[in-house]
Image (tube, rainbow, N blue to C red):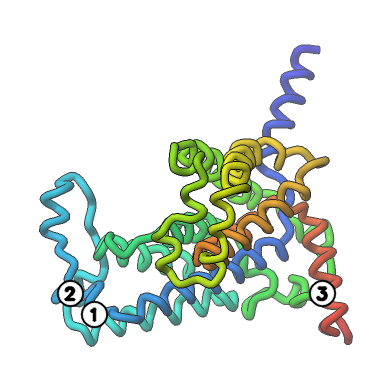
Amino acid sequence: MTDQRSGSRVAIWLRFWFFPVSLNQLALLRVGVGLILLYTLFVYSFDLDAHFSASGWSNLAALGELDPWSWHFSVLDWFPNPFWLWCVHLLAILTAMAFLIGILPLWSAALSLVILISYGHSNPAVLVGLDSLLLTALFYLALLPSGRALGLMAPPAAPTPLGGSLPEEDRVPWPGLPLRLIQIHLCLIYFFSGLANMDPDWLAGVDFWHPRLLETGLPLARDTLWLQARWSGLLAYGAILFCLFLPVFVWLDRFRYWVLGLAVAAHLAMGVIWGKLPQNLLMIVLLLSFVRPHHVDLLVERVGELLGLDEG
């Protein structure tokens, strides 16, 4: 009896880490992350020489003096000439496009990860929250077979793009481990974000009407001054509680989609008001990892029917 109980516990533990994953779900994650990756590289194209060339304003020697134990390896150091720097940047864009459309996604994701790390090591001053989140997403997607659906190099046995639900044999269990790690990583991000927001400025609602927000010139930023008088404190406490309790309720089937819906609405609102739409869109893309695989397949099938891509 004891052996049976221990065996069942081990089986439950293994099923938690290794669970069937929809190939369509992995492909949608690849497409969403690939689009944000292309946007990031497009933004890097502005003032590329000033930010990342050897003659730019970044000073790696000074950074080394401030932090002598940090690792500043960057492939950009091999190409000090601005011409070759642009060649590497063009390679990064082509690699991101290959990852987006599903051409060798494992290799293209790994190469994009190395290039993004090189950008960050070359000039850490340009890094923002989007870059860290993008590096995390690429690391996990490099471990997933995200090119077996909705990609140009998808095998013939794989489902056609937007062409219906996946059969059981196409729901492979081993990618469940990296996908589960994505879910746990997101929960940690939300939880520590809630803890970080428990400061006097946030609790007082100052971040909703801070002058630095108004300086961005966003139309909605000027209209949020009314939050100072009435709802800023309520929204601040609500945001903290939401970040702290999302890692709990998102694992409960009864509350999962309610929590995900609130998270999507919150990220869209924050992205528009704070002017950080790409970062919040990437969070929404990663939240797709919490959706049940058969629900993703059903959604893809319905979209395929609406677009008429399942005919013939």
SS for callout 2: loop
State the quadrant of the C terminus. Answer: bottom right
Circles 2 and 3: CB distance less than 8 Å?
A: no
Rendering coords of residue 136 (x, y %): 47, 55
Rendering coords of residue 233 (x, y %): 57, 42
Badge 1 density bin: few <14, some 14–19, many ≥20, Cα 10 Å: some
State the quadrant of the N terminus. Answer: top right
- The circle on residue 188 is none
Circles 2 and 1: CB distance less than 8 Å?
A: yes
Question: Which of the two labelled residues, at mark 2 and mark 1, occupies the earlier sequence position?
Answer: 1
- The residue shown at (63%, 62%) is 268
Camera-side residue: 244 or 248?
244
- The residue shown at (35%, 81%) is 45
Circles 3 and 1: CB distance less than 8 Å?
A: no
Question: Which of the two labelled residues, at mark 3 and mark 1, occupies the earlier sequence position?
Answer: 1
Alpha-carbon span between mark 2 and mark 1: 6 Å
Q: Work out whether residue 181 can be spotted.
A: no
Q: Residue at label 1?
A: 49
Q: Amino acid at mark 1?
A: Asp
Camera-side residue: 152 or 292?
292
Question: Which of the two labelled residues, at mark 2 and mark 3, occupies the earlier sequence position?
Answer: 2
Total number of numbered labels?
3
Q: Residue at label 3?
A: 303
Badge 2 density bin: few <14, some 14–19, many ≥20, Cα 10 Å: few
